[in-house]
Image (cartoon, grey):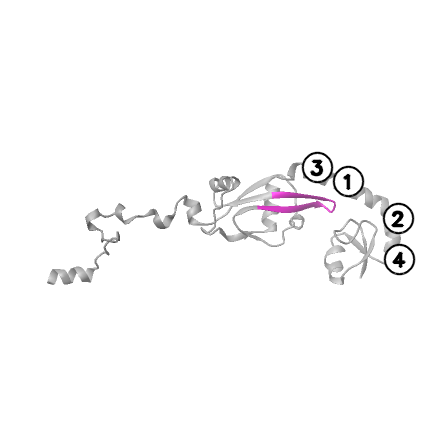
Amino acid sequence: MQVILLERVNKLGGIGDTVTVKPGFARNYLIPTGRALRANETNKARFEAERAQIEARNEERKSEARKIADELDGKTFVVIRSAAETGQLYGSVSSRDISDLLKSEGFKVGRSQVDLNQAIKAIGITDVPVELHPEVRVSISLNIARTTDEAERQVRGEDLTSAEAIYGEDINDAAQPEEFFEEDDLYDDGSAPAEETDSEEEEQSES
């Protein structure tokens, strides 16, 4: 299906170009979002008559996008989420979440402008591209962490995707038996005696 582009579309072309695309892409995205017109004689004439206005509007939107880009490009945002010790999030961070976050910080960015191939499902620092205009793209960083303290540690380069990294020690060695038993009560191999069950205590009392 052929369409006339009303703005630059990545990997397709620029304003005024007549390009061939899949019918579904044209009907479901390009035409309803105002990015293209169906290519026919009527629309070609309409485009040529309005070309100057279309190009002027595009320049105006591009100028506005560049102003936002000057403030947004390279900016880091901290996102606090619940996650397992392995770093796996209980949920995810989606394009909608990022759009809402940017809006709360004063940046008008729609969900479709966040170029995220798939939702983020683990803690860490992730770079996310944002398309403010077909000709204006920026990159932001999301510092996704369980707490603000851990977010600061991630900035310093710490990997917090294991219990040892989180707590700063090997938790398997953290609780030593000698901390809870007298030295004389430990076996020769250093292990602690098992606690007696109720049935074992009853047998001893009967004997």
Cα distance in 3D space between marks 1 and 4: 28 Å
* Residue 167, image quadrant: top left
Cα distance in 3D space between marks 3 and 1: 11 Å
Q: Amino acid at mark 2?
A: Ala
* Disc on the earlier residue, 1 or 4: 4
* Disc on the earlier residue, 3 or 1: 1
* Disc on the earlier residue, 1 or 2: 2
Q: Amino acid at mark 4?
A: Glu
Q: Which span of residues is magenta-colored?
A: 126-140
Q: Which residue is mark 2?
A: 49
* Disc on the earlier residue, 2 or 4: 4
* Residue 59, image quadrant: top right
Q: Amino acid at mark 3?
A: Lys
Mark 2 and mark 3 residues within 8 Å of each other at the beta carbon: no
- Of circles 3 and 1, the one toward us is 3
Query: Who is closer to the viewer here, 173 or 123?
Result: 173
Q: Which residue is mark 4?
A: 41
Q: Secondary structure at mark 3?
A: helix
Residue 119 appears at what percent x and percent y?
58, 53
Q: Based on the picture, tell me whether residue 4 belongs to the magenta stretch.
A: no
* Residue drawn 61% across the image and 39% down it: 75
Disc sitting over residue 60 in the figure: 1
